[in-house]
């Protein structure tokens, strides 16, 4: 049986650019005619992706599969870890929640099971594809954790894969971090590192050349490329570090000010991306009452622990600040944000929290009870806005079951089933990616514009086309910076 030729991308630290470079290689190999798949054995993220068969994987692997032009499956990310509270996380195996575990439990009790799950998933994937681009996590030089790690060099061993180490020069100290990482690897794993890529470079490459020459002489490893900083590629981020790029202050140059309530366990923040890309919108994060100001739209995004985040809003004064805007601005809640907009959230079985019940903001006549079963499903239907309906698609992923406490207008109809709630200028829905639907998004924003006395904007962008353009742009950018001929030679030689 033929097996895929793998290539693994590891980094000197989180946010070095592993996910983006993995995405780029997935698209490059696909463009070069190879049936290609991404693979990340174990992903820790609150941004997830729903496969066609209704299973949950890390969002990065879903996006990487799209870049490769293939359908995402759970074999591409067999283990997903979703933090719920301090030191505890929900462990999702092949897209289905297994159980909540504390960090020490996971490390002690899940290691052997996890290794078996990961090995089988990789082998099945390798039998179906020609190339597999494997993404590591964090860094491989965690000497206190490496005896039971399941995502870096142990996966390189399973896949018998060469490893490219990525360093982020934008953060400084790139040569020290590259050399230090390599030096901390045991001998058998040092030999797996076939070269390095320096990422996020700004400036004159000739000034960096002496450092590149020194590195190659000192380590004996080639610098396979220096990738310039790319700040305008619009591909879904997974790491919450991406939130550090969001502003917190209004921008007077933009006609619509959109305030996103940022609670500690915010999830699926990529729901916000299409609004960020609209020319008339300024999207900012709000973490304290003094930052709220006078926005035109307040968005409460998803949450992995709705009860704790609702409690956080009251403890910080954000709840009171939001309530002062009632009937003055538009407010939208997605998934956990939808639940928080209701009257009460209950968790009798402590699915997410030790809190049995927490008061919501009371802006929607609904109440939510957390259930032990998680709903994960792609959905299609029509959203209703002022008696006009708009075709939408997205996905649901939640543990809660929400019911109305009194008759209310529903937000959408999905296969004949009423979904969400609308009450005055407040809307709530479980549908993630709802703002990725171009017609609905522009109509909703135009409604807010008209309330401000602004002329509606007819033109918007095509979300799908924009994503495809971003894949192409990213691949071209990386191709230009990296010696792909050398990459192919390394992969071919390593296979032998």
Image (tube, rainbow, N blue to C red):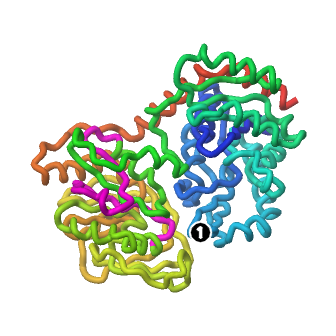
Q: Is residue 445 left or right of residue 238?
A: left
Residue drawn where x is 21% and y is 65% of the image: 325
Q: How crowded is mark 1: few (under 14 residues within 10 Å), some or many (20 or more)?
A: few
Is residue 285 found inside the magenta-colored segment of the image? yes
Residue drawn where x is 12% and y is 45% of the image: 454
Q: Is residue 262 left or right of residue 207?
A: left
Q: Where is residue 97 in the image (x, y as percent from the top left)?
A: 62, 68
For the question of whether residue 264 can be seen, the reply is yes
Identify the residue under disc 1: 86
Where are the magenta residues, as a range? 277-306
Q: Where is residue 408 in the image (x, y as percent from the top left)?
A: 24, 75
Residue drawn where x is 44% and y is 44% of the image: 245
Q: Judge by depth and name the residue closer to the eye, 432 or 204.
A: 204
Q: Position of residue 409 (x, y in %)?
A: 24, 71
The answer to whether residue 466 is above or below residue 452 is above
Residue drawn where x is 60% and y is 34% of the image: 172
The answer to whether residue 329 is above or below residue 361 is above
For the question of whether residue 339 can be seen, the reply is no
Q: Judge by depth and name the residue closer to the eye, 206 or 11.
A: 206
Q: In which quarter of the image is residue 37?
A: top right
Q: In which quarter of the image is residue 5?
A: top right
Element carrying mark 1: loop
Q: Judge by depth and name the residue closer to the eye, 425 or 472.
A: 425
Is residue 56 found inside the magenta-colored segment of the image? no
């Amino acid at each position: 049986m033929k097996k895929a030729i793998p290539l693994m991308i590891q980094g000197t630290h989180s946010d070095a650019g592993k996910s983006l470079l993995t995405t780029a290689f997935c698209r490059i190999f696909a463009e070069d005619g190879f049936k290609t798949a991404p693979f990340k054995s174990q992903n820790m993220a609150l941004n997830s992706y729903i496969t066609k068969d209704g299973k949950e994987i890390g969002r990065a692997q879903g996006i990487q599969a799209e870049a490769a032009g293939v359908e995402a499956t759970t074999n591409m990310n067999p283990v997903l870890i979703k933090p719920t509270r301090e030191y505890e996380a929900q462990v999702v195996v092949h897209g289905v929640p297994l159980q909540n575990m504390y960090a020490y439990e996971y490390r002690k009790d899940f290691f052997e099971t996890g290794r078996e799950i990961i090995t089988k998933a990789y082998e099945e994937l390798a039998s179906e594809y020609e190339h597999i681009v494997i993404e590591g996590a964090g860094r491989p030089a965690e000497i206190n954790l490496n005896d039971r790690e399941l995502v870096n060099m142990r996966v390189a061993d399973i896949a018998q894969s060469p490893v490219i180490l990525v360093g982020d020069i934008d953060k400084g100290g790139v040569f020290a971090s590259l050399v230090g990482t390599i030096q901390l690897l045991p001998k058998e794993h040092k030999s797996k590192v076939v070269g390095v890529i320096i990422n996020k470079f700004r400036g004159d490459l000739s000034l960096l050349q002496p450092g590149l020459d020194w590195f190659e002489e000192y380590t004996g490893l080639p610098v396979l490329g220096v990738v310039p900083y790319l700040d305008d590629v619009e591909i879904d981020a997974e790491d919450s570090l991406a939130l550090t790029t969001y502003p917190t202050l209004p921008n007077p140059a933009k006609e619509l000010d959109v305030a996103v309530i940022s609670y500690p366990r915010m999830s699926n923040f990529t729901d916000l991306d299409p609004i960020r890309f609209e020319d008339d919108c300024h999207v900012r994060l709000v973490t304290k009452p003094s930052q709220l100001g006078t926005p035109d739209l307040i968005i409460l995004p998803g949450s992995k622990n709705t009860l704790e985040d609702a409690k956080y809003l009251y403890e910080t004064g954000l709840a009171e600040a939001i309530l002062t805007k009632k009937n003055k601005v538009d407010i939208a809640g997605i998934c956990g944000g939808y639940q928080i907009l209701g009257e009460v959230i209950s968790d009798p079985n402590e699915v997410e929290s030790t809190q049995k019940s927490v008061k919501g903001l009371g802006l929607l006549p609904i109440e939510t009870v957390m259930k032990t079963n998680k709903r994960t499903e792609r959905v299609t239907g029509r959203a209703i806005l002022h008696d006009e309906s708009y075709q939408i698609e997205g996905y649901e992923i939640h543990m809660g079951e929400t019911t109305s406490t009194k008759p209310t207008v529903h937000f959408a109809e999905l296969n004949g089933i009423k979904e969400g709630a609308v009450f005055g200028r407040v809307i709530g829905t479980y549908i993630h990616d709802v703002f990725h639907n171009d017609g609905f998004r522009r109509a909703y924003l135009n409604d807010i514009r008209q309330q401000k006395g602004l002329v509606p904007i007819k033109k918007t962008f095509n979300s799908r086309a924009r994503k495809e353009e971003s894949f192409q742009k990213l691949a071209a950018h990386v191709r230009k910076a990296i010696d792909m001929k050398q990459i192919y030679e390394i992969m071919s030689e390593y296979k032998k």
